[in-house]
Amino acid sequence: MSITRIVIHCSDSPNFRADTAEDIHRWHRERGWDGIGYHHVICVDGDVQNGRPHYWQGAHADPYNKDSIGICLIGRDQFTNEQWRSLEGLVLSLTSEYPDAEVLGHRDLNEHKTCPNFDVSEWWTGVKAKRID
């Protein structure tokens, strides 16, 4: 599978609630899906939990699932410093593994979405600028 996108999402659950990848797996199964649609989940304490393995097509940003990796931040529109640090580290690692992948938010692929409720392009530009300094 050729990965061309790394898509950032939010769980849209209450901010700072201690949800996990297992909770999302359960929610998605309750909807009749095969299981968690994301490849990675970042909990409020910054713990990065695995969802689907990278070789398994995600179910997070139709019709872009076949060539993307999905990351879900637990929360709606406020994220902890630990989550920001983990997101930065994870995306840096993934862009090293998939150097041609574009980093964007779910809302950048679907005009009807606000997820992850921040400008991923602006955030990613800032992360890359820090790395150059």
Image (spheres, rainbow, N blue to C red):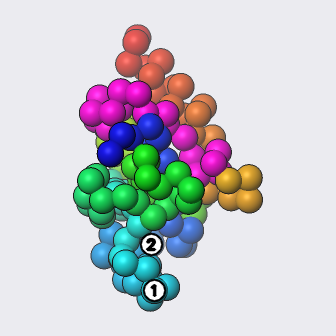
Q: In this view of the protein, which residue sits in the foreground, 84 or 128?
A: 128
Residue 24 percent location from the top left of the image: 40, 74
Q: Which mark is residue 32?
A: 1
Q: Residue furthest top?
A: 133
Residue visible at 43% across and 46% down? 67
Residue 53, visible in the rendered structure = yes
Query: What quarter of the picture does the C terminus occupy?
Result: top left
Q: CA distance from mark 1 to mark 2?
A: 24 Å
Report which quarter residue 45 is drawn in: bottom left
Residue visible at 41% across and 66% down? 37
The residue singled out by tag 2 in the image is 17
Report which quarter residue 96 is drawn in: top left
> Crowding near pointer 1: few (<14 within 10 Å), some, many (20+)?
few
Residue 44 percent location from the top left of the image: 39, 61
> Crowding near pointer 2: few (<14 within 10 Å), some, many (20+)?
few
66 falls in the magenta region:
no
Q: Which contiguous range is marked in magenta?
A: 92-109
